[in-house]
Structure formats: C-alpha cells, structure tokens
Amino acid sequence: MNETEIRQIIDTQRAYFYSGATLAVDRRIQALKKLKTCIVKYEPEIEAAIRKDLGKSRFESYMCETGLVLSEISYMLKHIRSYAREKRVHTPLAQFASRSYRKPSPYGVVLIMSPWNYPFLLTIDPLVDAIAAGNTAVVKPSAYSPHTSAVIQKMIQECFDPSYVTVITGGRAENTCLLHEHFDYIFFTGSQAVGKEVMKNAAAHLTPVTLELGGKSPCIVEKTANLKLAAKRIVFGKFLNCGQTCVAPDYILCDSSIRPQLVEELKRQITLQFGETPLSNQDYGKIINEKHFQRILGLMDPDKVVIGGSSDSAALRIEPTVLDQVSFTDAVMQEEIFGPLLPILTYDSITDAVHKINAMPHPLALYLFTSDKKIARTVTSACGFGGGCINDTIIHLATSEMGFGGFGESGMGSYHGRDGFLTFSHTKSIVDKKTWLDLPMRYQPYRKSNEKLIRFFLK
C-alpha cells in the first residue's frame, strides 16, 4: 500500500470520527460484541496461523493469546459504561456556583503497531481498549508473522467498515509511510530501536505515544526460595513461546550458595515439562525466522552450556538451554536474548543484587523468588522495573485488573482494563459555571476588600 492510499484511509477515518459515530457507548459495546463473536468464529484459523508462524500448540495459543483477548473484551464490556461516565469532582468555594467534572474523550484516529511474538494478543488487545475508548484505528501487524496478520485482516474486514477500523499489512515501507502521517495517538509494541524511531516520528506531529518495549528482565532467586517451585515456574516463564516473550526472565541472578541446587532443579524441570528430547516435542514452538535463529545461536557460549544447547536449523528450533558461570560482560548479557537461553549469574548479598539491577537499564519485568517478606518489600521498592511477580513469572500481565507496561528504556504508558481505556482517552477537565450568580471579586478594578476575600478562599 502506497503513501497516497494510506493517507486516504487516515482522512476517511478522521472524517468518520468527527461525524460522532464512535462516541456513543452503545456503539462501542456493539463493536466489541461483534469482534468477540468474530474471534470465536475464527478461533481454529487463528490457532492454525499462530502455529504456522511460531509453532505454538493449540493449548498455548488459547492460554496466551486468544483466551486473553476474549477475557479483555469481556472485562471491558462489563466496565465500559462506568469508565466512559463523567466523574464529578469537588468544586473550590472560590468557583461557586459551578459543577466541576472530568470527561473521558477519545483521541481520534489511533495507530496500533504490533510485534510478531504474540501476533494476535498484542494486536487485538490494544485494539479492544482503543475501540472501548471511542477511537477509530489503523492496525499494522508484523510482517514477520504473515499467517496471523492475514487472519487478523480477514476478521477486521468482516467486522468493521474501513472508516472505523482497518488493517494495513506489509513491511518496512508501509511502517515508514504510516509513521510519517499524522495520527492522534500511536500505540507501539516492539523493540527499543524501533521504539525510538516511532517516538522520533511522532514528535514531528506532537503525537502522544505508548511504547511497550522490553529489556533484560532479571529473575532473582534468593537463598530462602522454594527451589523446586522456583525452577518449575522459571522454566515455564522462560521457555514459553521459545523464550520469545517480552516479559520472559532474561537471566537468573541467584544467591551464590544455592546455585548448584538451582541448576539441578532447572534441569529436572526442563525434562519434566519438555521431555528428554525437547526438539521432538510437538508442543514446543520455534524461532520466528532464520535471522533470529542465527542471532540467538551467536549468543550461546558452548563452554558455558550446562543444560540443552542443541538446535535444529531446518525446524528453527533451539533446545531450552541453561548457561552457567556467566558474567555481565558475556555476549549473552549485552542484549535482550528473546530466545530459549537462560544465563545464570550470582550475587553474594541481596544489596549487591539490587545495586547491579539499578545500574542497568530499567527492565520491563522483575521476578523475585523468596520466602523472606522483608526482602520482597526491599527489592520491589528499591528496584526500578515495569511490573513483575513474587514467587512466579509472567502472570502479572494476564489480568485486566492491573495495567501492564514499562518505563524508561522498557517503554512508557500502560494498558489492560481501566488503564487501557485511559491510555486511549484524553480526560477533559470541565467547569460548568452557573449564570445566576457572578462573584465580582476577580474583576478589575482590584480592591483591598476583594484581596482579603481572595486570600480567604485560596489559602
């Protein structure tokens, strides 16, 4: 799709938005219900597409993508009237007589750019929030997950008029054209490098953005942790989707005294969850493409592999792999891994661990395994991170009751549930002043008696 066609789509959506067609809450509810029905209808095709793109099993596709989207729609349908309602606030005595209130209002035409690692979830979830808030949307899924993008396009075309929601497929050329256009809001999920380009282009139009990025999310295993349970939950979170999860534990930072026991428990759990030969496990996914496959292999130091390490280039599969005796200067610690490699580093005191984490760019997630409540409070208070879990991994994003997002190098803004509605809304602050009374003290000429009243009201 060329620049002229893209601009025409945006102009058409802006005209549709200013017609007021998306403002009525009943209209938004109708749109969300229609989308939900369509997702249920196309669930087998969604599952097949995700398997072709990422090798995910049916169970994993529903648990981590389709099911979470349906849950978000159900949550939004339950709460949308409350979220969209004007909220009255206290009016200062100096503004008597008037009514003050906050009015959530949609931004207008929004751009949603999604990644390939959770191609359905990370495309449709923000779209649900954007529709609920009353916007129109241009959706740009990743070119790296073409089968899922094709199903999404088919669904959206069936559900919505292009003046309301439309999907633009393609690669870098289409991304560039879109970012050169004027949107009212941009929601981007992806890498830090592309996030910088998104923000740079958005600045040309002073367009507000939400950036959902990533980073090296640490997993601290403290000496009082239940190691068997910790290993079980770390293996689940790290190797889900072959490690291609933005909030996956990127590395383990454990107390040096428990490192040998933790390695043994990780080995046991990998075998229990993925079998003796994970590369032949049909429920274990694959790396998205050859480029990322080779990049991940390049981060693997064979001398430090203690679990796994094998790969299948034809199937683009890499075994769940644990690296031991790793240092912060190793290649695997210089970038977000985004694959099934799990380095283990150690610390001698929890204070040292906190200082090291805070010396690095802010991660999107942090995980802490401990039985010590005081240490849990210390780490969660002292470390800077987007969100996380105590004694688990990943599950903090699987709820509509809490916002999900990063800060600093891991992004800005959040979504899910109420946070998602507010992300795609501008809240107007309005004073409705009554006409039957007009206090004269604010008008010139200023008098000492009026100054006394002003000081009384505003102190």
Image: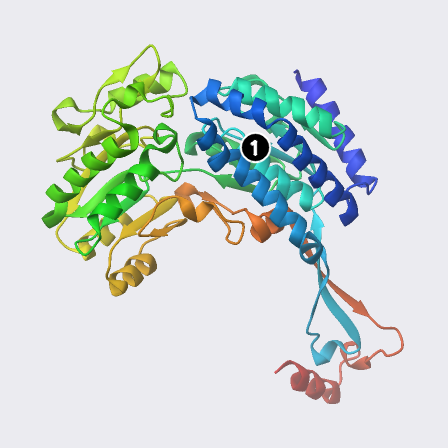
Between 21 and 98, the residue placed more toward the observer is 21
Q: Does residue 291 appear anywhere in the picture?
A: yes
Rendering coords of residue 229 (x, y %): 26, 47
Between 199 and 116, the residue placed more toward the observer is 116
Q: Which residue corresponds to the image point at 50% horizontal and 40% vertical from the top-left?
A: 211
Rendering coords of residue 448 (x, y %): 72, 88
Whether 393 is drawn above or below 291: the answer is below
Q: Does residue 186 appear anywhere in the picture?
A: no
Kind of residue at badge 1: Thr
Which corner quadrant holds the C terminus?
bottom right
The residue at the far top in this view is 314
Say whether residue 100 is left or right of residue 245.
right
Q: Which residue corresponds to the image point at 77% horizontal and 42% vertical from the top-left?
A: 22
Rendering coords of residue 377 (x, y %): 31, 63
Q: Which residue is label 1 attached to?
A: 123
Q: Label 1 neighbourhood size at 10 Å, few (<14), some (14-19), many (20+)?
A: many
Query: Toward which corner of the image does residue 282 lie, by quadrant?
Result: top left
Say whether residue 101 is left or right of residue 300.
right
Rendering coords of residue 336 (x, y %): 33, 33
Between 359 and 55, the residue placed more toward the observer is 55
Query: Toward which corner of the image does residue 160 lie, by quadrant?
Result: top right
